[in-house]
Amino acid sequence: MVGVLVALLQAQDHPTIEVGEDRLLSADGPARPLVESHLSADPNNANHLLVGVIQFDSPDGNNRTCVAWASFDGGQHWIRRALAVQCGGDPWGVILPDGSAILVMLGYLKGRKDNAFLLRSPDGGRTWPETPLGLGSQHDHPMVIARGNQVYVASGGGVHNSSNQHRDSVSVAHFGGWRKDLWPAD
């Protein structure tokens, strides 16, 4: 019986994963450390890739830029864009079915109280807005997923209620007016 099961499992058709050679995102641009990278792929176009990353701009690590890298040829060539947010950490990205790209990260933007931000590139990562959507404060380790064109941002940060109980924050952003709802998750 076990032999038949093993033979049946071996006979199933499995997709193959091809692993190519390592490639630099770019030989152009500053030679600075890049950390906490997050790679996303377009659900409708395997050649469209997005990387969100933190670039260290000073030796002490206090000045950091959030950087987006986009490829439209399966990683052969990359477009680098520095984002408006001074990066604090945890860049996460997703590419939506319409080809637009979303990046969420912790960071700082002068004059803003938010510590988590969401940016949308309507052209898949070629260009990014100067003004990100602020997701509030008290966030940590934001993660982004999409279901269709609805974007969900979950964070390990949150608020304490009057009983001093911690409640995580969840942000849901919808396209069309960039309506966002913030509420404590149970």
Image: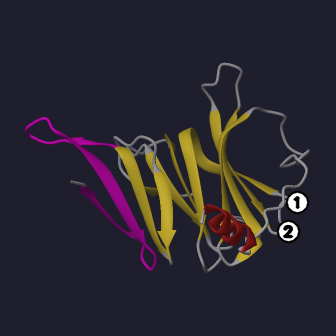
Q: Is 148 above or below relative to 159?
A: below
- Viewer can see residue 129: no
- Viewer can see residue 119: yes
Dot 2 surroundings within 10 Å: few (below 14), some, or many (20 or more)? few
Q: Quadrant of the C terminus?
A: bottom left
Q: Quadrant of the N terminus?
A: bottom right
- Front residue of 112 and 156: 156
Residue 98 place in picture, x, y as percent: 61, 80
Secondary element at tag 2:
loop
Q: Residue at x 54, y 42 (%)?
A: 90
Q: Which residue is mark 1?
A: 77
- Front residue of 148 and 177: 148
Residue 140 place in picture, x, y as percent: 41, 40
Q: Is residue 148 magenta?
A: no
Q: CA distance from mark 1 to mark 2?
A: 7 Å
> Callout 2, which amino acid?
Asp
Q: Is 138 above or below relative to 33?
A: below
| Direction from residue 22 to residue 16 in the image, left or right | left
| Direction from residue 126 to residue 160 in the image, left or right | left
Q: Which residue is mark 2?
A: 73
Residue at the front extreme, as displayed: 1
- Front residue of 104 and 152: 152
Please give the count of numbered marks on the rendered protein: 2
Q: Residue at x 39, y 48 (%)?
A: 155
* The magenta segment: 157-184
> Callout 1, which amino acid?
His
Residue 174 position by quadrant: bottom left
Residue 4 position by quadrant: bottom right
What is the image's colouring? secondary structure
Q: Residue at x 71, y 68 (%)?
A: 7
| Direction from residue 151 to residue 123 in the image, left or right | right
Q: Which mark is residue 54?
A: none
